Structures are given as C-alpha cells and as structure tokens.
Amino acid sequence: MCLSVQTIRPKEGWQVYSSAQDADGRCICTVVAPEQNLCSRDAKGRQLRQLLEKVQNMSQSIEVLNLRTQRDFQYIMRMESQIKGLRSKFRQIEADRKTLVNKNFQELKGKMESLQPLIPVLEQYKTDAKLISQFKEEIRNLSGVLMGIQEEMGAYDYEELQQRVLNLENRLRNCMSKLTCGKLMKITGPLTVKTSGTRFGAWMTDPQASPKNNRVWYMDSYTNNKIVKEFKSITDFVAGVESRTYNLPFKWAGTNHVVYNGSLYYNKMQSNIIVRYSFETGRVVTQRALESAGFHNVYPYTWGGFSDIDLMADELGLWAVYATNQNAGNIVISQLNPDTLQIINTWNTEYSKRNAGESFMICGTLYITNSHLTGAKVYYAYSTKTSTYEYTDIPFHNQYFHMSMLDYNARDRALYGWNNGHQVLFNVTLFHIIKTEDDS
C-alpha cells in the first residue's frame, strides 16, 4: 500500500480499494471503492456494486501494465484481435436491445468507446500475457453486466455509472501521462525479418501512422540510387509483394533516412541538403541545407558509406545528427521542424562522429553504438533535456557482423536495422521515471 494513501480522505461511504507505486515506493495511482455495507439495498444495487468493482479491477490491471516496459509483437497482435472482438460485442448489444433506455445507453457506450484509443498506448508497456488476457476478460464482462443492468435500472443509475466511467477515463489518462518516455535499459533480439538487397540499405515504417497503416518502405544501397519500394505490410514485405515504387527526384546519400508523418526525409547526394518528399503527392515538399554540416564522407560513421547526416525520429519529433568543422568533427544534434526543416534547437557534443558506429534517438536522448563491431553495444548517451552525457554499457547482438542502419520507431517500440543485407528488428526495454505531484 502506498504511504501517501494515509493522506487520502474518500467521500463518506467510500474506502481506499487499491493503489500502485513506482520503484521508489512513491504512490502514483489510488482506487477508491464503496464500503462493503454500501449499495446492498436490493439486487440492482448489488449488480451496480459488482460492476463498479469490475471497473476498478480493470483500472488496477492497467496500472500494473503501465509499470512494465518490455513489449512483444505477438501480444500486440492479440490485443488488436481483442479490440475487434469488443467492437463486435457492442454491435451485437446494439442490435439485440429491446427495452433499453436508448439515450443513456448511447451516452455510456460513447464513453466506453472513448477508452479504446488508450489501448494502443498501453500496448507499448505490456509484457505479461496473463494480465493482458485478464484485461480483455474484464472489458468483455463489463459489457455483459452493462447489458443486464441497463434493462433493469433507471436514468439516475445510468448517470451515476456514466460518472464512474468518466472518472476511470480521467485516471487512465493521468497515469499514462506519467509514462510517456523512458531511459534505455536493454536491447533484445534481433528478429531477422528478411534477407535481401546489398550489404547496405534502409527499411522503415512510419511512427506517426495510424495502427491500421503498416506500410513498409525499402531503400537499397547507400548511394547512386533513388528508387523507394513500398509494401502494404510486413507480410507483403517478407513475401516481396510491392504495392508501389517511387522514383525520387534526387539520389540519396547514406542509409540514414526516416519516414515521418507521411513524408520521407533524406540527405541529397553530394550535399548537406535535407529533402522532404511526400508519398501522397509524389513530390518534394521542401528542401533545406543543413548549414555547416559535413557531407560526402567528411564526417561519416565509422563504416563510411556517406553516412555524414543521420535523420531520425522519436517521441519528441524529427532530428538530424551530423558533425561540423566548428565543433571539431564532433557530433551535433539538431531538432528540426518537420514541415519547414528549420532548426528548432541544437546541441554540440564532445563525441567524434567518425568514432561512432550508428546512433538513434529515444525520448530526446541520443544513443551512440559501436554497431560495426561483432560485440556491439550502446556505450554513450547524450540527453538534450539536460545537455549532459553519460557512458553506458548496453550490449546487443550484431548477428551478421556489419550494421549500416539502426533507427528507433516510437510506435513499435523497436529498433529497425540493416545488418549486412539482413533486415532485422530489436526490442528495447525502457525504464520509466514516473513523476508524482511531489516532483518539481
């Protein structure tokens, strides 16, 4: 039980039901419930109490999930099917209702549906298949009990139930706001998705795309190419079933491109110009020179390949990682406006770009690897939030001995890699620093 629970004074007739705390023992979420002798006046009251307890149990399960950070693709697939099942259940309830209080039912149904967008966010923090299964069952049971109660109870009870659902929604959003970002702790894998192309290249999905949009883009080689292949899904990508091919107006340099919110951002060959190309219109939206940035193997990563300018995206937006003469060839980090490509802010590090293997951004922190080596690891991290760095020791398996592309995808909570002609995925584990009301 959280220590801070002692300070909570529930309204008359209510008691502290459960609580959740972070690794330091600080209370982050507390559930209150009716006292056991309350709401026992009749069968309808008992049903309402049971329903409220189910909502509270569901909330507690979600809070446990929020404190976990290692994701698993198979669990996400299961959750997607569960969401479809929930929608089907609502359609069935709506089709079969006979004597329901239509207005109140529709309002409550809308509140329940408003909770569903939270599920894809929760997916990023789950690892326990049993808890996820229980979460699914709680929602299913909630719909069934709701069906029974709405046939027996009047408008006043609906209003009370609606308020309880609204309170749950607010609590969930409050808890989720405390788990938006985290610190890299572990990298697992890789999973080899496909073997294709040359030794060097890039493949990616759009972290800003909707859950139903799983398009894959594929860019083979690090120079003298401007053909981008599109696939509708990972399955089509593995099978080699292309949906579309784009012929870019300019050839690219390196392998450090990124797709962000429907546009491809890449370094124009033999220049320090960044190009934003819209897949929807098939045209260049804008292009802008990254002032003072080295290019054409002046300041590449250790493996070379014209990897002077590395474009990447994370939870906070679009970034460019490069080096300049002014910073003595050390890495420079700039956050970019994704629409105009103008620099929002810049940080100068003291780490040599030529001594880095590959790098990627997570939650505003740049992680640098020696990924060109067999015994690869993340060994340096620079936080743009605090403008400080630290040395780390996070190993990962460089299975095919030569990494020429490594980028983080915030939607999938995974690293996409091009490993010596193999397209691979790594899972990442983040440690969440949970903020409480006591934190400044």
Image: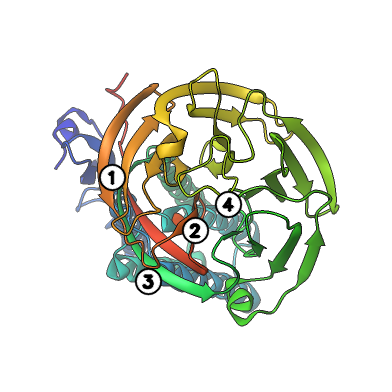
Instruction: Quadrant for residue 141, please give it.
Output: bottom left
Mark before the other along the chain sequence, 3 or 4 = 3
x%, y% of residue 283? 85, 49
What element does badge 3 sit on? helix
x 68%, y 45%: residue: 266
Separation of marks 3 and 4 at Cα, in angstroms: 29 Å
Q: Disc 4 marks which residue?
A: 207
Q: Local crowd at mark 3 within 10 Å, few (<14), some, or many (≥20)?
A: some
Left or right position of 377 against 351: left
* Quarter that holds the N terminus: top left
x 35%, y 65%: residue: 189
Separation of marks 4 and 2 at Cα, in angstroms: 12 Å
Q: Disc 3 marks which residue?
A: 137
Q: Can residue 186 be seen here? A: yes
Separation of marks 3 and 1 at Cα, in angstroms: 20 Å
Separation of marks 1 and 4 at Cα, in angstroms: 33 Å
What element does badge 4 sit on? loop
